[in-house]
Image (tube, grey):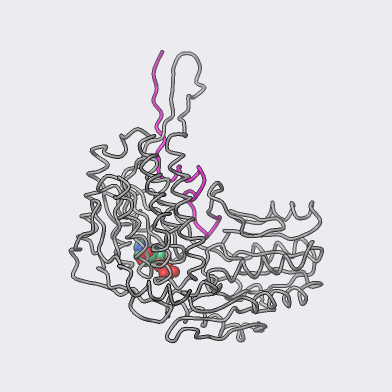
Amino acid sequence: MTTTWTQAARTIPRPTQAVIDGVGVEALTDRSFDSIGPRDGEVVATLPACDERDVDRAVAAARAAFADGRWRDRAPAERKAVLHRFADLVDAHRDELALLETLDTGKPIGDTTAVDAPGAATTLRWYAEAADKVYGEVAPTGPGALATITREPMGVVAAIVPWNYPMIITAWKIGPALATGNSVIVKPAEQSPMATLRLAELASQAGLPPGVLNVLPGEGATGAALAAHGDVDKVTFTGSTATGRKVLEAAAASNLKSVSLELGGKSPQVVFADAPDLDAVAEAVAWGIFYNQGQTCHAGSRLVVEDAVADELVGRIAEVARGLTAGDPLDEATQLGALVSREQLERVVGYIDLAGQEGATVVLGGGRSEPVEGGCYLEPTILDHVRADARIATEEIFGPVLVVQRFDGTQDAALHLANGTDYGLAGAVWSADHARAERVAARLRAGSVYVNCFDLGDVTVPHGGFGASGFGGRDKSLHALDQYTELKTTWRSL
Ligand code: ADP
C-alpha cells in the first residue's frame, strides 16, 4: 500500500496559489516560501508568502462579499445546502486531501484518511445543520415593550490556523463562521497550507459565492498583517501562547477587533492507585500523548500518578509505546509518523536534553529514528521523576514526550501537581472511587475534563481552555457560534 500512496504523491496536483474571490490568483508579493515535507525533508511545494498587499486584496474581497449580502442575506436553509455540498465534496476528495495533509505534516496516512479529512467533513456538516436551527430570543421585559435578541454575523473574520490539525481546525473555524453568514480569510500555517487551499477550491465548487472564503498562504507576517488590519472584524487564532499574545496586541493597537485564542496546554492525567483497570489507563495515557506524535494541544503530556502504582503503570505505558508502529507516514500500517519540521524536532530534542539537567530520568526512547531518510522522526519518550517546577513539567513540549510526576496518594497533592502550570486546556482523573473522581474533576482547572477515560471527542462539545490556554470563546459545539456573531437587541415600545 505504501507504493500506491508514494506513487500518488508523485503525481498529485499541489495547490500553490492564494485563493481570493473564489479563484486561485497570482499573489502580489514577490516573496515565496517552501513547505518542506517532514517525511523525507524534500520540498513539497513553493508558495507565495502573501504580504500586506495580498492581505488588503483578500480583506477587500471579503468585505465586498459581506457588504452586498451575497452570503449573509441568503436564507439560512440555502447556506445550509451549500455547506452540505461542501462537506460532501470534502468526503468525495478524502484521499486527495489526506495525502496533501500527510505530505505537508508527516501525519500517518491512516490518520489523515480516517480522522482528519472525515473530521473536517463532519464538522462542516454539523454547522451546516446549525445554520437554520438556531433561534433568537424574546426578552422577558414585560408588557410595555417587545425586545428581541438576535445574532448578527461579525463581518470579515480572519482565521489563523496552526499545523498540527490543519484541516480539522480550519473546519472548526470556517464551519460556524460561514454558517452564520460571515466572510472568512484563512491563514494556514506555513508548514501545512496545501489541504486548506484545496478546501477553498472545493467550497467554490460547492457554490459558496466568491469572496466568502479566501485562503492566504504565508508565514507569520501574513498572520500579523491580518491581525493588525483595520477592516478585519474578528481574528480567531489557534497556536502558541507567544504568538497569541502578539495577535492580541495587534488587535488592541489597530481596530480593537474581537479576538478568540486557543493556545495549547500541558494536560495532566491524574491516576490514583485504585484506578479500575491499569491496562486501560496505560492505553489511554500512551495514545493520549503519542497520537499525532504528541503534537496535539490537549495531549495528555503529563502523567500525575500515585506512588503505589507508578512503577507498574509507567512500565505498562512503555509496553504500549513499544508496540506502536513507527514508520513511513505513507504506509497505512504506520501509527507514529514524522514531527512537522526539523525546527520542531530540534525543539523537542532540546527539552529531552534538558531532562537530565532537571533531575529527570529517561525511561523510554529519547532518540531520533529515521524510517525514511532525511525525515523528522523521534522515538516515543517517557521522562520520569520530573519535579513540579521543572521546565519540562511546565512548558508545552509538543512532541511525543510524556512527563511523569508522582504523588503520595492524597487528593491535594494530586491537584497541586495537576494544576501546577499556567495552562488549563484538558485533564483527566482515574479512580474507582467515584466520589473522589468527581471531586478531583471539579477542581481540575481545565476546559475539558475526563473521568476514567481520555480524549473522547465530538463536535457537539466545546473545545478551549482556562488561563494561558486562551480565552475569547470556544471552538466546536453551538458555543462556537458566539465567536462569530454579535448579539443585537431590538426594542419596540408597545
Ligand atoms: P508554532 O510556533 O507552533 O509554529 P505559531 O503560534 O507561531 O505556532 O503559529 C500558528 C499560526 O500563527 C501559523 O499560521 C503562523 O504562521 C501564525 N503566526 C506566526 N506569527 C504570527 C504573528 N505574529 N501574528 C499572527 N499570526 C502569526
Q: Nearer the viewer, residue 248 or 338?
A: 338
Q: Nearer the viewer, residue 10 or 351?
A: 10
Q: Nearer the viewer, residue 10 or 491?
A: 10
| Left or right: 348 in relation to 403 | left
Do we see residue 243 in this rendering? no
- Residue 455: x and y in percent read 61, 59
| Left or right: 458 in relation to 260 | right
Magenta-colored stretch includes residue 87: no
Quarter of the image for residue 299 reads bottom right
Q: Nearer the viewer, residue 367 or 93?
A: 93
Q: Residue at x 17, y 63 (%)?
A: 28
Magenta part of the chain:
465-494
| Left or right: 417 in relation to 22 | right
* Figure check: 87 above or below 421: above
Q: Residue at x 48, y 56 (%)?
A: 118
Q: Residue at x 47, y 50 (%)?
A: 123
Badge count:
0
- Residue 90: x and y in percent read 40, 54
Magenta-colored stretch includes residue 470: yes
- Residue 195: x and y in percent read 37, 62
- Residue 207: x and y in percent read 30, 45
